[in-house]
Amino acid sequence: MSDKLLKRARQQQYMENQILITGANGFLGRTILSKLQVAGFSVLATDVGDVCSVLNTIYRKADITQPAEIKPLVENITTVMHVAGLAHVFNQDASTGEKFYKINEVGTKNVAAAAAAAGVRHFVLISSVSVYGPYTDEPYDEKRSCKPIGPYAQSKYNAELRATEIAQKSGMALTIFRLATLYGEGDPGNVGRLISAIDRGRFFWVGNGSNRKSLLYKGDAARAVMAVVQRPASGVNTFNISAPPCTMREIVDSIGDALGKHPFPVRLPASLALLMGRCLSKMPDRRLAGLNQTVKKWLADDVYDTRRFEESYGFQTRTSLQDGLKREVDWYKNIKRKP
């Protein structure tokens, strides 16, 4: 087949693949939506906002916690990308757990059930490596048993279970992406907070920075999603997605280089930090309750085996740690300059 005919066949395939993306205004949702548009897919976007943040998009406002609002969206849809979810709640209160449950677990169940009932062929669920637990003792693969800790991780794992139950019962193909910590322009999460802390002179070293972490640039996460949309597999498939692991020292140094801010002279030994974390977590102040876990997570490894997806789809991340962090820091600087 000539290149011209092949291109025409692909365009026809894309037009026939009617895609619904939830969470279209979110950090990752916007990135995926933009790539879908560039590739020429026919896309319907939805979120809770009144308008879509990506231009030239067919958009319908809907709340995934309300089944009646989801049902009309999945009519004539062949692929659902369920990106919507609640994350990055740093000041949690007594109601936070219920919010995670309602949005992440019940919301996923609602969308998956509506999709299956409408005859959707492929459901893509964005999940998180947090389902394994807060840290790893070796590179975890998809066969590792999940031990989620905390309301967010538990809600993401339960969302996987609800979607799997529906997919297996209906025969709908399901792809679950367990993404490593995302970062990039517009980052509302932990890397963004670290950049702000370093920029404002509020960062100090805990430990020596030799422990390894897994990060994933948002553009590479979107590329992984695009790969399964273009070549979906049957049944239920779960994939870890991450860039190669890096040390905390590499992360902090790359941010410091991009900000032009070095050095960070204050250093707290790991053993002392762990002792302080245990003691302070026992105090009645709720703000200190999770300090011990936070310190342990900072000092621990957080590494995942991504070979299953790489071998299945010939996938490799393209954005280096230094380039990705520089892009985020440049975005951060531009935001600071705005009045």
Image (cartoon, rainbow, N blue to C red):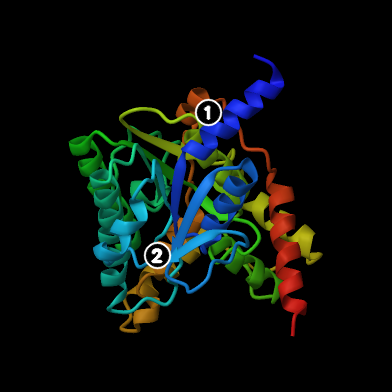
Q: How many marks?
A: 2
Which residue reaches farthest left?
169
Q: Type of residue at label 2?
A: Leu
Whether residue 274 is visible, yes or no, is no
Q: In front here: 76 or 168?
A: 76
Query: Relative to 157, is 26 above or below?
Result: below
- Nearer the N terminus, badge 1 or badge 2? 2
Whether residue 164 is visible, yes or no, is yes
Quarter that holds the C terminus: bottom right
Query: What residue lies at 37% left-to-right and 76% top-to-bottom?
Result: 92
Query: Relative to 309, is 300 above or below?
Result: below
Left/right placement of residue 111 relative to residue 129 reads left
The image's mark for residue 310 is 1
Query: What residue lies at 45% left-to-right and 44% top-to-bottom?
Result: 18
Q: Type of residue at label 1?
A: Glu
Quarter that holds the N terminus: top right
Query: Badge 1, how many Cα within 10 Å: few under 14, some, many 20+?
Result: some
Q: Marks 1 and 2, how far apart in space?
A: 28 Å
Q: Which residue matches tag 2?
A: 86
Could you tell me which secondary element the residue under label 2 belongs to? loop
Could you tell me which secondary element the residue under label 1 belongs to? helix
Q: In front here: 186 or 120?
A: 120
Left/right placement of residue 97 relative to residue 52 reads left
Left/right placement of residue 116 relative to residue 142 reads left
Q: Quadrant of residue 173?
A: top left
Query: Badge 2, how many Cα within 10 Å: few under 14, some, many 20+?
Result: some
Query: Relative to 251, is 330 above or below?
Result: below
Residue 244 position within the rendered picture, expressed as x and y whole percent measured from the top left: 59, 38
Residue 312 position within the rendered picture, expressed as x and y whole percent measured from the top left: 48, 24
